[in-house]
Image (spheres, rainbow, N blue to C red):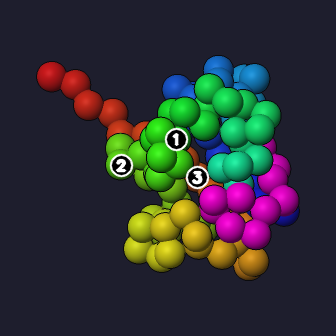
Amino acid sequence: MVRVLLPAMLRSLAGGEATLDVDAPTLDAVLDSLGAGFPALERRLRDETGALRRYVNFYVDGEECRRLDGAKTSLAEVKEVQIIPSVAGG
């Protein structure tokens, strides 16, 4: 079981939840599970092709997933996935 941590800006898309526990073997499977329950949340995390959005960072036990295997990163020994969208202003 992996604990997914959501920032305040995404919680409204997940029924107000700050954390969600998901049983999934890969980051991709976590996103599939989140998408099944919260389609609007999935649209903020993945683009139309299903790829991870470039402006969203996914940390797998503190390591950015793109430095690992991206969406295919195994979660076999993982305890936590943190999702952090980039914030810009000007």
* Residues at discs 2 and 1 in contact (Cβ within 8 Å): no
Query: Disc 2 or 3, which lies upstream in sequence?
Result: 2
Q: How far apart are labels 2 and 1 at the CA level?
A: 9 Å
Dot 2 lies on which element? loop
- What residue did someone put label 2 on? 54
Q: How far apart are labels 3 and 1 at the CA level?
A: 12 Å
Dot 3 lies on which element? strand
Q: How far apart are labels 2 and 3 at the CA level?
A: 15 Å
The answer to whether residue 56 is visible is no
- What residue did someone put label 1 on? 45
Query: Disc 3 or 1, which lies upstream in sequence?
Result: 1
- Crowding at mark 1 (Cα within 10 Å: few <14, some 14-19, many 20+): many
Query: Disc 2 or 1, which lies upstream in sequence?
Result: 1
- What residue did someone put label 3 on? 82
Label 3 amino acid? Gln
In this rendering, the answer to whether 34 lies above or below 15 is: below
> Which range of residues does the magenta coloring cover?
19-29
| Label ID, residue 77 | none
